[in-house]
Image: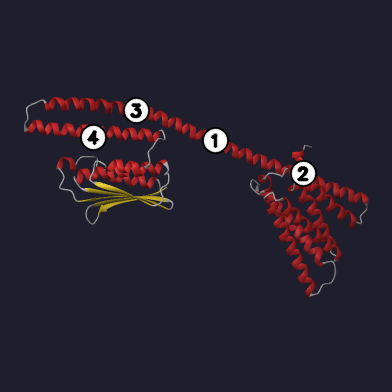
Amino acid sequence: MTRATWTSWPSREALSRQGRTRPRAVIAWSVRALLLVLVLWGTFTAGKFGPWEVAVGLLGVLGCAWTAWAFFRTSLEHRLWPSLGLMVLLMAAAFGAQQAGAGVSAVVLWCGCAVTALERLPLSAAVPATVVALAAYAAVNADGWMTTALTTGGLCLAGYVLRLDAEARGSVLRLLAQERVARAAEAESAALNERSRIAREIHDVLAHSLSAQLVHLEAARLLIERQPSGEFRDQVLERVVAARSMAREGLAETRQALAALRGEVAPVEDFLRQLVTAEPGEVTVAGEQRPLTAEASQTVRRVAQEALTNVRKHAPGATVLVRLEYLPGEVALEVRDRGGHRPVEELAVSGSGYGLLGMRERAELLGGTLEAGPGEEGFVVSLRVPA
């Protein structure tokens, strides 16, 4: 064996209960219960005990049980000297039980220490501990040297087999964990590739189409401006300019969507400030700022856009107050308008009418809420989503 074989601990996966099947767990608890029963039986059948002796015996058994539990914890944490100290305490308890006449309890403790040391300690510490425990057992065993030799050999074999079995289970758990990580990375890579493909399609179709519309609308504006001034000409020019502005905004939103698909999204705070630059209003941010998930960030952005679009349609000229607050486990957005004047009827009734419904559905998909309704001075949209 190499030096590493003697000094290395069994893996934490091997020493833990993780990955044990139900039958294995039942067997393990059954063995522990049997050992406890044997210790109790060996302690209280060694002679006649009075109340004082019974109390001392119970305390001794409870102390051994606690020491064994502590040994399992320290060995799981790969703490060598505390583990060896607890093992010495168990062997000392076995020696005390032997001196008190509880030979069965002593044998159970020594044999248990021998097997457990081989299963859970580095071999450089397990072998000496096992030799000491089995030597103590052989010294008190009166069944003959052949029986003693077979018993000690069987205990050594059992301890080492348990060690190999635990290591095999630990290796399987590590391989499963690595496979899960690899699958998650593969799924993430596939998702990124698909998002990149969608981004390319949007860029090639929608972005190019909007850019072409901008060019034609700008050309139409220049042609209309060359015509003699008049009421009809001014109305057409106003609508062309509005259409050009909407196409420019659509192109900007498309580019933002493309950036989101490629993972190149600007912070939400910067996006909100840029969104409000064209409006009379302000943006306030409260709480400790932190990166948001892609879904939460996109929902906040889309709700803010839809809320500002509604302000333009239903309360042109209103002052917009946007508040973004970082809360424990979630983020809150509030868009409030104040003032404004009666909207132009054609613009007020434009749109699909599903803006609020779409915003609410976005929030509910993430487990959040959206409330919208009249406030003290205007209309208020309040969004809360986990983040």
Q: Seen in the image, is 82 located left or right of residue 357?
A: right
Residue 240 can be seen, yes or no = yes
Q: Earlier in the sequence, mark 4 or mark 2?
A: 2
Do the CB atoms of the residues marked 3 and 2 lie less than 8 Å apart? no
Residue ID for mark 1: 183
Residue 358 seen from this side? no
Say which label, 1 or 4, has the lower sequence index.
1
Q: Mark 2: which secondary structure?
A: helix
Left or right: 63 with respect to 329? right
Q: Amino acid at mark 2?
A: Val
Quadrant position of residue 40: bottom right
Mark 3 or 2 closer to N-term? Answer: 2
Name the residue that disc number 3 marks.
203
Q: Which mark is residue 381?
A: none
Q: Amino acid at mark 4?
A: Met
Give the crowd class for mark 3: few <14, some 14-19, many >=20 residues within 10 Å: some
According to the picture, the residue beneath numbered tag 2 turns out to be: 161
Q: CA distance from mark 1 to mark 3?
A: 30 Å
> Marks 1 and 3: CB-CB under 8 Å?
no
On the image, the x and y values in percent for residue 302 come to 32, 42
Reading the image, the residue beneath label 4 is 246
Q: Quadrant of residue 93?
A: bottom right
Q: Nearer the viewer, mark 3 or mark 2?
A: 3
